[in-house]
Image (cartoon, rainbow, N blue to C red):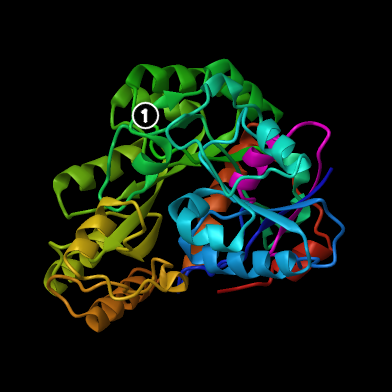
Amino acid sequence: MKFYLIYPKWPKLTGQTEFHLPPHGPVVFAAALPDDVDIEFVDENLQEIDFDVTADLVGISVMLTSQIQRGWEIADTFRARGTTVIFGGIAAMLHAEETMAHADAVFVGEAEGRMEALLDDFNNNRLKKLYNYLDDQPPVELIGPARRDILNRDLYNYRGIQMVDLMHASRGCRFNCYPCAVAYLGGRKFRPRPIDIVIEEMAGIDNNRLFIVDNSLAQSTKWEKELFRAMIPLKKNWCSHPIEDDPEVLDLAARAGAWYVYQAVFDTSDLIRDRIKRYHDHGIAVEGTILLGLDEHTEESINRLIDFLLEVDLDLAEFTILTPFPHTRAFRDLEKQGRILTHDWKKYTADQVVYQPRHISPDRLQELFHHAWDSFYKDESQHMKMFKLFKRVMEREMASNTYRPRQRNKADRVFGRKKA
């Protein structure tokens, strides 16, 4: 069977330096397909879709709400030519009902152990419109190594610098943060993968730089410490979402190669200031993730937050606007209050105001968003701050004899010049 797997294009945040990471969802999904399926993968952010391809089945893997309408357009084109199309991925789960109008089948949930039955239905002309396993997660032991071999690795670099490879060590999240859909998608139970399997997958990735994409590693202190201890011999450099603010955990993380963390900066408290300092004291850089437009935010508090970010010596900052994605607490509250201004999903990019803020006009919040980016990067561009972050990791790799310079090729020259 020939399976043509597509990752639709999506826009970068306004002001963000443009680079492309190898997508995670498609390679995890590909690992769940039977071995006899011939997979051809195209990332539309960097490659052209071949609408004339000869394929038994087209799969569209959609991560972001802002991708979903492009996914529908692609599906409509293939289906008009008589090709069967199935959807999967985070955004397909969040928009399953709408997506069914553009698909022969929509897969909702985690794919491990499920695809043989779906493909059997396809081969016997009994494909169902919806396969819903959202409340029936497979055992984490079934999660094998992602199929990174389907990627064109030459495309995923920034100006000749090799980017990170994505992987996950757990699923689910015991937290239920206001703007986040993970509780809906993966459940409120923390489900760590067996550490020996995680380490085996990490060791098998031909890249010293990893992004551990788990929603939060700070969900089980015992598991976190065991994971970091097991990672130390790998000599990988990695980034992740927050890790636990505990001296022993931070020490183990640093020894295991923690390069930088994404840390939500939600106020100007000493708690945040001290946490950033502790990361830095352990040699771990910090990229602040700053969400603007929460109900408690006023113009004064946002300007105070921007000033605070310049004081605490963040290595990078990424600003987003509160976006009420379907199946989040934010969506339910704002929809109930009649404050959502549009359901045009192309605008759900996290850099556009799509709801009525409580204390600020939509236009003024949009202006403050741009002001935040401009203010933080006024003295040093995001490109330069990124360069310093990668320079740091290359120095660490050279010190540990794990640095591997890449030979620049045509793909490097073409895509390396791309800017936001």
Residue 206 appears in the rendering: no
The span picked out in magenta is: 22-46
Q: Residue 152, percent across and down?
A: 77, 52
Disc 1 target residue: 250
Which quadrant of the figure has residue 198?
top right
In the rendered view, does 99 fall on the left or right side of 160? Answer: left
In the rendered view, does 28 fall on the left or right side of 175? Answer: right
Residue drawn at 23 percent across, 81 percent down: 364
Q: Residue 157, percent across and down?
A: 68, 56
Q: Residue 172, percent across and down?
A: 41, 33
Residue drawn at 19 percent across, 71 percent down: 357
User: In the image as oriented, which residue stretches furthest toward the right?
Assistant: 54
Residue drawn at 25 percent across, 51 percent down: 329
Residue drawn at 17 percent across, 43 percent down: 271
Asked if residue 366 is among those painted magenta in the image, a careful observer would answer: no
Q: Residue 122, percent across and down?
A: 73, 43
User: In the image as oriented, which residue stretches furthest toward the bottom?
Assistant: 363
Asked if residue 33 is among those painted magenta in the image, a careful observer would answer: yes
Dot 1: few (<14), some (14–19), or many (≥20) neighbours within 10 Å?
Answer: many
Q: Secondary structure at mark 1?
A: helix
